């Protein structure tokens, strides 16, 4: 059953702690993305990756880090430098962003992060 | 970078047709128009995508006029389960940089009433 899986569904962070959100896809997609959504707001791009071992900052990358060691996986670390991490985090994937490609993104179910 | 403008909210009743219009005045030649649906506490789901004229699938229709400066998502005979936020995105699949099709605005919150 193809899809994109995020874990955990709920996550709690203590002050000063780094936490890592998992995102795995078996759609054979080259591109993967992380978004943050605050209540009543749209999605804001944190990081995206076009290929393995390469990633680009989005609009709100400060306080976050990512890695892309495998095509299937794109974990997001929320570092202690992110002072307001409480939000709904969404991971997505799509085929490679090539010229003329229709970039349709497929999303996971999300991880809700709260600060203790 | 094509910017989109949508109504913040819309109300409808079950069984009615709903049309949500998105303005994108500076759409580029290579840009596609894509609509997503999001239910509370879930990730957005792709609904429909088009380049020009009319596109129809089992869920919705997308109308795009000749100048492509706007588009209208049409949902036929809505039900309570269509209550959701609908996002309009415009952009290309070109490699590199922040692309319009990675920018989700606040979307349009559709409320369907019995």
Image (spheres, coloured by chain):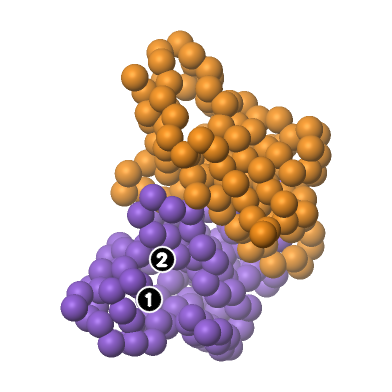
Q: Residue at x 27, y 65 (%)?
A: B9
Element class at badge 2: strand
Crowdedness near tag 2: few (<14), some (14–19) or many (≥20) residues, C-alpha within 10 Å? many
The answer to which image quadrant residue A95 occupies is: bottom right
Q: Are marks 2 and 1 on the same chain?
A: yes
| B24 shown above or below A97 | below
**What percent of the width, then of the height, locates residue B90?**
56, 65
Q: Quadrant of the N terminus of chain A?
A: bottom right
Residue at numbered disc 1 = B20
The answer to whether residue B60 is above or below residue B81 is: below
Which chain's residue wears label 1? B
Residue tagged 2: B86
How many callouts does the rendering have? 2
In the rendered image, which quarter is residue A20 located in? Answer: top right
Check disc 1: other Cα within 10 Å, few if <14, some if 14-19, many if 20+: some
Front-lying residue, A81 or A70 = A70
Position of residue A7 in the picture relative to residue B51 (left or right):
left
Image x and y of residue B106, in percent:
38, 55
Q: Chain of mark 2?
A: B
Hue used for the chain lettered A: orange
Q: Colour of chain B?
A: purple
Question: Is residue A40 rendered to the left or right of residue B50?
Answer: left
Name the image quarter holding the C terminus of chain A: top left
Q: From this viewpoint, is residue B72 visible?
A: no
A57 in relation to A80, above or below: below
Residue A72 in the image: state x and y as whole percent.
74, 44
């Amino acid at each position: 059953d193809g899809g994109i899986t995020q874990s955990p569904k709920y996550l709690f962070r203590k002050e000063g702690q780094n936490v890592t959100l998992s995102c795995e896809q078996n759609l054979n997609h080259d591109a993967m993305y992380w978004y943050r959504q605050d209540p009543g707001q749209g999605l804001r791009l944190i990081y995206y990756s076009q290929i393995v071992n390469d990633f680009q900052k989005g609009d709100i990358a400060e306080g976050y880090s990512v890695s892309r060691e495998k095509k299937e996986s794109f974990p997001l670390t929320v570092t202690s430098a992110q002072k307001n991490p409480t939000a709904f985090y969404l991971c997505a994937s799509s085929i490679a962003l090539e010229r003329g490609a229709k970039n349709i993104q497929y999303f996971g179910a999300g991880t809700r992060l709260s600060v203790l | 970078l094509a910017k989109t403008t949508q109504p913040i909210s819309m109300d409808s009743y079950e069984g009615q047709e709903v049309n949500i219009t998105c303005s994108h005045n500076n759409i580029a030649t290579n840009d596609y128009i894509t609509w997503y649906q999001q239910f509370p506490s879930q990730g957005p789901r792709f609904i429909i995508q088009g380049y020009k004229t009319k596109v129809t699938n089992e869920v919705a229709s997308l109308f795009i006029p000749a100048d492509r400066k706007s588009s209208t998502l049409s949902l036929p005979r809505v039900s309570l389960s269509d209550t959701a936020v609908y996002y309009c995105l415009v952009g290309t699949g070109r490699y590199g940089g922040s692309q319009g099709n990675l920018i989700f605005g606040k979307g349009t919150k559709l409320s369907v009433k019995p």
